[in-house]
Amino acid sequence: MGILRQVAEYLYIKKPDPNQEKTQWMKYMHGINRISIFVFLFAMLVLLVRYVILPLFR
């Protein structure tokens, strides 16, 4: 369940663990992971609209 907890923290659903070590490199890594998750979710939304919702209106 550690992976799901980390994804929830990236998406601002769950507060981060206050006891976790915070280094500058960890902040960079988490920032890049957060960006990649948001880009992935945006791409899934675009695919959903393009291949599922738009054909319903044609």
Image: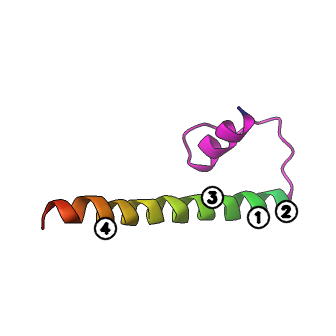
Q: Position of residue 20 (x, y in %)?
A: 83, 40
Q: Position of residue 35 (x, y in %)?
A: 60, 64
**From mark 4 to mark 2, how far is it between C-alphas?**
37 Å
**From mark 4 to mark 1, how far is it between C-alphas?**
33 Å
Q: Position of residue 52 (x, y in %)?
A: 28, 59
Residue contact between numbered discs 1 and 3, judged by CB atoms under 8 Å:
no
**From mark 2 to mark 3, how far is it between C-alphas?**
14 Å
Helix or strand or loop: what does disc 2 sit on? helix
Q: Amino acid at mark 3?
A: Arg
Helix or strand or loop: what does disc 1 sit on? helix
Helix or strand or loop: what does disc 3 sit on? helix
Say which of marks 4 and 2 sits in front. 4
Point 61% across, 64% down: residue? 36
Q: Amino acid at mark 1?
A: Tyr
Near mark 4 (Cα within 10 A), the count class, few <14, some 14-19 or many ≥20, is few
Residue contact between numbered discs 1 and 2, judged by CB atoms under 8 Å:
yes
| Residue 41 image label | none
Please tell me which of labels 2 and 3 falls first in the chain: 2
Point 58% across, 58% down: residue? 37
Residue where numbered disc 4 is placed = 50
Tell me the magenta residue range.
2-24
Rendering quarter of residue 23: bottom right
Residue where numbered disc 2 is placed = 25
Point 31% across, 64% down: residue? 51
**From mark 1 to mark 2, how far is it between C-alphas?**
5 Å
Say if 55 sits above or below 19 in the image. Answer: below
56 with respect to 32 (left or right): left
Point 63% across, 43% down: residue? 9
| Residue 34 image label | 3
Residue where numbered disc 1 is placed = 28
Does the magenta portion include 17?
A: yes
**From mark 1 to mark 3, how far is it between C-alphas?**
10 Å
